Image (spheres, rainbow, N blue to C red):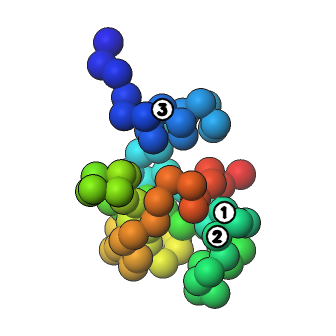
Amino acid sequence: MTELHEELQCWLDCYGKEITLGAKVTVSKDFKYHADYDDDTFMVTSLSFDADGLNIGINGGGDNWDTEYDGFRINELAIAS
């Protein structure tokens, strides 16, 4: 069995499923620094790693796959209910 990166494992432990492309997320209540992302549901459109860890891209809402913002960190998002 392949071991998950610690940030991916943290998400799995918190939400009971892995973060994947197409996952529906919200901006965490603690990180509402972008007014455009308040109180809406977004889709994960990209996952990559950089020197700071997992970098998550999301769309502008709905089901389109166009990345609108690429730069969220794992602690800035929560799974949509």
Q: Nearer the viewer, residue 1 or 33?
A: 33
- Contact between marks 2 and 1 (CB within 8 A): the answer is yes
Residue marked by disc 3: 9
The answer to whether 70 appears left or right of 41 in the picture is left
SS for callout 3: helix
Figure quadrant of residue 12:
top right
Residue 81, position in %: x, y? 71, 51
Outermost residue, front side: 51
Residue marked by disc 2: 31
Say what amino acid the circle numbered 3 marks: Gln
- Contact between marks 2 and 3 (CB within 8 A): the answer is no
Outermost residue, top side: 1
Q: CA distance from mark 2 to mark 3?
A: 21 Å
Instruction: Name the residue: 64% across, 70% down.
Output: 31
Residue marked by disc 1: 28
Q: Earlier in the sequence, mark 3 or mark 1?
A: 3
Say what amino acid the circle numbered 1 marks: Ser
Instruction: Name the residue: 32% across, 12% down.
Output: 1
